[in-house]
Amino acid sequence: MICVPDADPKGWRFPGKRGRPIHVGWFMRNVIKPIAAKLGFPEIHWHALKHWNNSAMLKTGVDPAVRMKRVGHANIRTNLIYSHADLALQRSASDAVWQRWQAAKQELEKQKAGSQTPPSLLTVTLSVTPNQGLPVIY
């Protein structure tokens, strides 16, 4: 059955005939695989879609608890296996590190120029982001 968890038939994403849910095998064979083949992925399977779904949710900032429930994971470690950072997320991480490096470099240059304020350099603080709930090092 393909539907929102705990939804009544009106909440089904792909309702079948006679008020019954669509069988996932039929849906994969007749809907997903033809589309995937046209996109150049003829051997697509549910497991790959599970990885893609979780990674798409990660990219848009969906909370890990929500991602875990939607893909059926019991713990965060399993969910992280299915969380693939795309190029945009990798660039964002690189930019954050580069900006922090530049700030530390400027502080050091100020100190060398005679400032009495000691540089903090690359201080590490632990925080929890509201969107992901995971510790992040700044």
Image (cartoon, grey):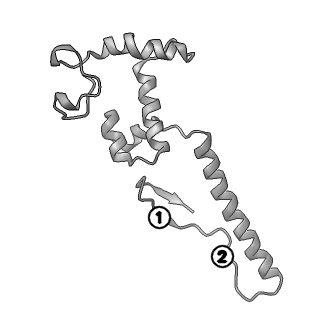
Residue 58, percent across and down? 46, 43
Q: Residue at x 22, y 32 (%)?
A: 11
Instruction: Determine crowd level at label 2: few under 14, some 14-19, many 20+ residues with C-alpha closer than 10 A.
Output: few
SS for dot 1: strand
Q: Quadrant of the C terminus?
A: bottom right
| Quadrant of the image occupied by residue 77 | top left
Residue 30, percent across and down? 38, 10
Q: Residue at x 21, y 14 (%)?
A: 17
Residue 74 visible? The answer is no
Along the line of sight, the residue nearer the viewer: 111 or 2: 2
Q: Residue at x 38, y 44 (%)?
A: 76
- Against 97, residue 89 (above or below) is above
Residue ranking furthest to the bottom = 116
- Against 100, residue 18 (above or below) is above
Residue ranking furthest to the right = 113
- Amino acid type, label 2: Ser
SS for dot 2: loop
Circle 2 sits on which residue? Answer: 120
Q: Residue at x 17, y 27 (%)?
A: 9
Query: How many marks do you count on the picture?
Result: 2
Circle 1 sits on which residue? Answer: 127
Residue 59 visible? The answer is yes
**Which mark is drawn over residue 28?**
none
Residue 115, percent across and down? 77, 87
Separation of residues labelled 2 and 1 (CA atoms): 18 Å
Along the line of sight, the residue nearer the viewer: 101 or 53: 53
Q: Quadrant of the N terminus?
A: top left
- Amino acid type, label 1: Ser
Q: Are the residues at dot 2 and dot 1 in contact (C-beta closer than 8 Å)?
A: no
Along the line of sight, the residue nearer the viewer: 26 or 119: 26
Horizontal side, residue 20 vs residue 101: left or right? left
Residue 130, percent across and down? 41, 59
